[in-house]
Amino acid sequence: MAEKNVLFSGMQPSGKPTLGNYLGAFKNWGTLQEEYNCIYCIADLHAITVRQEPSMLRKYTKELFALYLAAGLDNTKNIIYIQSNVSAHSELAWILNCYTYMGELSRMTQFKDKSQKQGKNIPTGLFNYPVLQAADILLYQTAVVPVGEDQRQHLELSRDIAIRFNNIYGDIFKIPEIYIPKAGAKIMGLQNPTKKMSKSDTDNENNVIYLLDDLKVIANKIKRSVTDSDNQIIYSDEKPGIKNLLNIYCAITNKEIKQAEKDFSGFGYGAFKEAVAEVVIEEIRPIQENFKRILADKEFIEKAIKDGAQKAECIANKTLKKVKKKVGFI
Ligand code: TYM
């Protein structure tokens, strides 16, 4: 690759991708693809930290590959690949485990949340998860990692691990910067707007907009979203439902929140929700059309998956080789 800096990000194929995933992450990846050498990973190794049905994991992995392309990521300009196809991730993760502290991993809020749902038998993979994420990023000498707000703590840990390793062995890893979008960094549930919209939240379908939902279903979910009763479109923590809809609206239209508040002053909630639904649907419609077309071309996808893995492997192995040498492996 040329002298451009590397941008790296990833998503787990652990369920149906949501509007939160799109607005917090891969909508922005697309806009950065001219400026950086971009590498986008489908994090299936991360996905198995909670139990997955193998046939569903395969389906979601392929679908996510097609969805990345459908949303405008270009696999001829960038590298798009499946994490488990590149064994360097698992190898570097093991090595970095030996440079990461139990205390650090115990402080991860996502581990605390997810482990609570696991009952007595918490997989150690769930605990080590952020180390694998650090390996993902550091293998590619990444300069910038665009993610939603919920990944900030993991990225800070990736930086700490890289700095620690470099302090011992010299300049092996580039220290990655975190990039979090202004609007869209944390899209909340439609029924419970005090908790983030999550693809693993399968209990209440109305809480989550899935990117592949029928467009009419999306409009209905927005119409039924929980708000409050004072009928004023103001961006405030005391009005989490309206705040969330304004965030969604602005993340899509690139409008400033203040401007949107002005534009909607005097609107009732019904009309406001309709306007939000309209921009969401117009954003998602072409993605769904592209998605169907791309997914139908099995040969193309299979080739693209293979190509992506080869390109990623080539870069990842260079860093892994340096690391192995530094730690004293023959
Ligand atoms: P994952 O699969 O949970 O989410 C993928 C991306 O979507 C963002 N996101 C959100 N943004 C806004 N609002 C929401 N409600 C919302 N929900 C999710 C996430 O912040 C993320 O950017 N561990 C990562 C995947 C990963 C990764 C990496 C990311 C693996 N290796 C290396 C960056 C770099 C994860 O579970 O994302």
Image (spheres, helix red, strand yellow):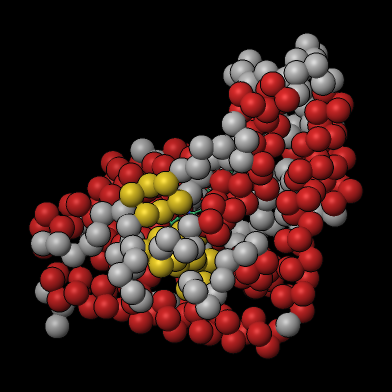
Whether residue 193 is visible here, answered yes or no, is: no
Query: Residue shown at 30%/70% (left/top)?
Result: 3
Q: Residue 96: image x %, image y %?
A: 27, 61
Left or right: where 213 falls relative to 64: right
Whether residue 218 is visible here, answered yes or no, is: yes
Q: Quadrant of residue 74?
A: bottom right
Query: Residue shown at 54%/75% (left/top)?
Result: 75
Q: Residue 232: image x %, image y %?
A: 75, 15
Q: Residue 283: image x %, image y %?
A: 73, 51
| Closer to the camera in the image, 209 or 50 | 209
Q: Residue 71: image x %, image y %?
A: 65, 62
Left or right: where 58 falls relative to 176: right
Query: Residue shown at 14%/69% (left/top)?
Result: 327
Q: How many marks?
A: 0
- Residue 114 vs 87, above or below: the answer is above
Query: Residue shown at 76%/43% (left/top)?
Result: 279
- Residue 164 vs 55, above or below: the answer is above
- Residue 6 vs 307, above or below: the answer is above
Left or right: where 237 falls relative to 249: left
Q: Quadrant of residue 139?
A: bottom left
| Closer to the camera in the image, 207 or 34 | 34
Q: Quadrant of the C terminus?
A: bottom left
Q: Quadrant of the N terminus?
A: bottom left
